[in-house]
Image: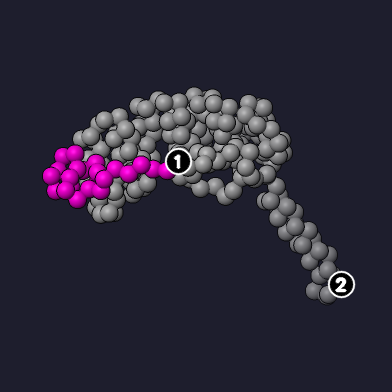
């Protein structure tokens, strides 16, 4: 093949590659995310829901829709969206965290407990969630359940103070070595108006901002 004849073929290949690249980079959810990002609460939720209705499943749209309901205090709607998202993305922990946060915010303590257990069933080695479940049991006075979980936590973290205190309720040994309860300093609440930052799964349960960057 002569160099002159090869040029059109090379050019066509370059165009095809460029076309594939631009197609891969385009996110149909982007216009709805940009629209919703400029809004808050239920107004933002309308934009994200419209995007889901028009383009179908989108992890980012589900994520931001659930957050917008959280921002508006619509805890049940946020939990429902998280369940909807888990139907499409069953292995995405972020939606399990969203649901747990919604139930805890709504003070639906049994549902919150079940949501934490669902996370542990999917991710049994998650000591942070296991600790949250232990703390939940402590807060509602279920000392035996708290101690049972604390035993597992101690196996991985022998110096975990919360677990030591939970075990002290049923063991003289742990009662002797458990640290005294300390008053925790109040943490400054993160403002919803602060700029977003990189997604951190456990940050959801700590009330950190959830929106993705547009």
Q: Which residue ends up furthest to the right in the rendered image?
A: 4
Residue 142 can be seen, yes or no: yes
Residue 174 belongs to the span the image colors magenta: yes
Bin the neighbour count of mark 2 within 10 Å (Cα to Cα): few under 14, some 14-19, many 20 and up. Answer: few
The residue indicated by pointer 1 is 186
Q: Residue at x 61, y 45 (%)?
A: 196
Judge by depth and name the residue closer to the eye, 65 or 57: 65
Q: Position of residue 134 (x, y in %)?
A: 30, 39
Q: Secondary structure at mark 1?
A: loop
Say whether residue 122 is visible: no
**For mark 1, does the 10 Å Cα neighbourhood hold few (<14), some (14 to 19), or many (20 or more) residues?**
few
Q: Total marks drawn?
A: 2
Q: Which mark is residue 208?
A: none
Q: Earlier in the sequence, mark 2 or mark 1?
A: 2
Q: Secondary structure at mark 2?
A: helix
Which residue sits at x=57%, y=50%? 198
Residue in view at x 71 percent, y 36 percent: 38
Q: Is residue 127 left or right of residue 168?
A: right
The residues bearing labels 2 and 1 have C-alpha atoms spaced at a distance of: 74 Å
- As rendered, which of 132 and 194 lies closer to the eye? 194
**Residue 111, percent across and down?**
38, 27
Magenta region, residue range: 163-185
**Residue 145 picture location, percent across and down:** 23, 35
* Extreme-bottom residue of the structure: 2
Query: In which quarter of the view is residue 147 placed?
Result: top left
Contact check, label 2 and label 1, Cβ < 8 Å: no
Residue 4's mark? 2
Taking the image as shown, residue 156 lies to the left or right of residue 95, namely left
Asked if residue 39 is among those painted magenta in the image, a careful observer would answer no
Query: Which quadrant of the rendered structure holds the N terminus?
Result: bottom right
Q: Identify the image quadrant of the C terminus.
A: top right
């Amino acid at each position: 093949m002569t160099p002159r004849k090869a040029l059109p073929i090379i050019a066509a290949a370059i165009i095809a590659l460029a076309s594939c690249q631009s197609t891969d980079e385009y996110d149909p959810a982007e216009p709805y995310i940009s629209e919703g990002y400029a809004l808050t609460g239920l107004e933002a939720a309308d934009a994200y829901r419209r995007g889901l209705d028009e383009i179908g499943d989108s992890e980012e749209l589900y994520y931001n829709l659930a957050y917008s309901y959280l921002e508006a205090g619509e805890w049940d709607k946020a939990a429902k969206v998280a369940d909807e998202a888990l139907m499409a993305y069953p292995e995405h922990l972020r939606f399990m965290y969203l649901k747990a946060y919604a139930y805890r915010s709504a003070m639906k303590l049994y549902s919150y407990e079940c949501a934490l257990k669902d996370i542990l069933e999917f991710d049994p080695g998650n000591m942070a969630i296991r600790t949250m479940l232990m703390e939940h049991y402590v807060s509602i006075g279920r000392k035996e359940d708290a101690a049972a979980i604390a035993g597992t936590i101690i196996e991985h973290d022998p110096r975990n103070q919360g677990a030591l205190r939970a075990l002290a309720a049923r063991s003289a040994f742990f009662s002797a070595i458990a640290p005294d309860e300390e008053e925790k300093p109040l943490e400054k609440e993160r403002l919803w108006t602060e700029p977003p930052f990189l997604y951190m799964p456990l940050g959801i349960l700590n009330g950190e901002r959830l929106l993705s960057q547009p």
